[in-house]
DNA sequence: GGTCTAATCTGCAAGCATTGTTGATTGCCA
DNA sequence: TGGCAATCAACAATGCTTGCAGATTAGACC
């Protein structure tokens, strides 16, 4: 996405007002690589602006999505995640433990569909999603398992 | 998934009762390649058994998923889709117009991540999702566009 | 076949993410 | 500096899915 200053311009160009609420959302998203949910954006904005409503955050995220400034991702984590990195095409990795999302690059051109893609279908997007456990969650599972072992031995 | 007869066995083995409701769900899913939603399964079962509840269909789908007899797919279509093809690993194509889902094969081994996969991450699944428009929806869009053209010219 | 009982069924309420609504508020241009 | 359309906050409603509780039933035992 563009910088908060450039976004101010873009919003006015499109005929949308530049309110303090929207600027606060810009600031949270700019150069943010965490792929936050609407709720997470709301919490972070609310630290600086406690009166903002979740509805306004959703509205601003939708506006930014419509303008192509951010991406709306559905990664099967329950809530949508928003991605301010629209400059470089990329794919995602999701931790099924904690919901962490990270960018991954993949060479789509090397992908072969073995002629199973129907000819009449117009592809708009090919998306790769890597699911698994991040190192943090792996370590936590490890701890839990050894603790179970311990209490079993102790009982 | 196994055949309805084999599923009867498997359910009893696991300690689950084989009720007419469950058998009706088995029959709808067996050799069904349409990736139906819970609602769609419900509608089809209800044709033969009008008293069945949506809740029971969900429960049976969850049981079958837990037993590994079907797959629970989240393809961003609003509702979950259920896939009775667990025998062959495959991927999916989704029409953003009508929600149609079709199987596609892809050679995952040929996929290169350019060293962007973090080393500490344990991958459980790599999923490819192709989004676009099916031929039916493309034709419909075509019709609508020419109709718009028509009424504009006529006005 | 008849009895018993835990599992299941149905109907409805509730949960969660997201959107609709509406009266009050405010950015922005004249 | 006004005026007003756009926006805001609060709350209701939506769509999908699960929780709950009392009525019903599959399947084991006799
Ligand atoms: Mn990203
Ligand atoms: Mn499939
Ligand atoms: Zn994690
Ligand atoms: Zn379609």
Image (cartoon, coloured by chain):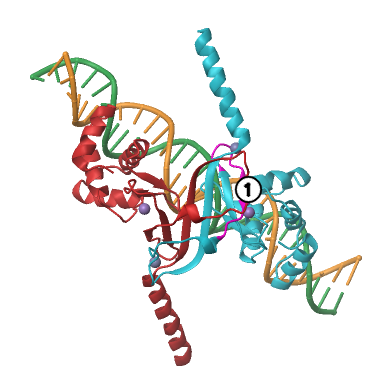
Chain colours: A red, B cyan, C orange, D green
| Left or right of residue A11: residue B39 | right
User: Which residue occupies 21% across, 51% down?
Assistant: A47
Q: Is residue B78 in view from this perspective?
A: no
**Residue A12, image quadrant:** top left
- Specify the quadrant of the image occupied by residue B39: top right
Q: Residue at x 53, y 8 (%)?
A: B154
Q: Which residues are magenta?
A: B95-107
Location of residue A96 in the rendering, given as x and y in whole percent from the top left corner: 45, 63
Q: Is residue B145 left or right of residue B55?
A: left
Quick check: A110 above or below B140?
below
> Which element type, helix, strand or loop, lies under badge 1?
strand
Q: Is mark 1 within 8 Å of ligand 2?
A: yes
Mark 1 is surrounded, within 10 Å at the Cα level, by few (under 14), some (14 to 19) or many (20 or more) other residues, namely some
Q: Where B65 sits versus B43, above or below?
A: below
Residue hosting label 1: B102
Quarter of the image where the N terminus of chain A is located: top left
Q: Is residue A102 visible?
A: yes
- The chain identifier of the residue carrying mark 1 reads B
* Magenta residue check for B96: yes
**Left or right of A147 on screen, residue B43:** right
Residue B8 at what x, y percent from top left?
Answer: 77, 65
Indicate left or right for B85 with C15 as reference: right
Q: Residue at x 27, y 48 (%)?
A: A29
The answer to which of A26 and B136 lies nearer the viewer is: B136
Q: Nearer the viewer, residue B42 or B154?
A: B154
Secondary structure character of the magenta stretch overall:
loop
Q: How many marks?
A: 1
Indicate whether residue B99 is drawn in magenta: yes
* Residue A91 picture location, percent across and down: 42, 54
Q: Position of residue A63 (x, y in %)?
A: 34, 36
């Amino acid at each position: 996405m563009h910088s908060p200053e450039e976004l101010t311009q873009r919003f006015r160009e499109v005929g949308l007002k530049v309110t303090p609420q929207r600027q606060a959302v810009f600031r949270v998203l700019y150069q943010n690589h965490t792929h936050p949910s609407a709720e997470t954006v709301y919490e972070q904005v609310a630290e600086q602006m406690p009166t903002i409503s979740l509805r306004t955050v959703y509205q601003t995220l939708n506006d930014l999505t419509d303008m192509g400034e951010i991406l709306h991702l559905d990664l099967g984590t329950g809530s949508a995640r928003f991605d301010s990195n629209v400059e470089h095409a990329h794919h995602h990795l999701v931790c099924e433990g904690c919901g962490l999302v990270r960018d991954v690059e993949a060479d789509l051109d090397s992908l072969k569909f073995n002629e199973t893609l129907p000819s009449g279908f117009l592809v708009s997007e090919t998306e790769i999603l890597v699911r698994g456990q991040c190192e943090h969650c792996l370590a936590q599972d490890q701890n839990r398992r050894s603790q179970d072992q311990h209490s079993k031995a102790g009982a």
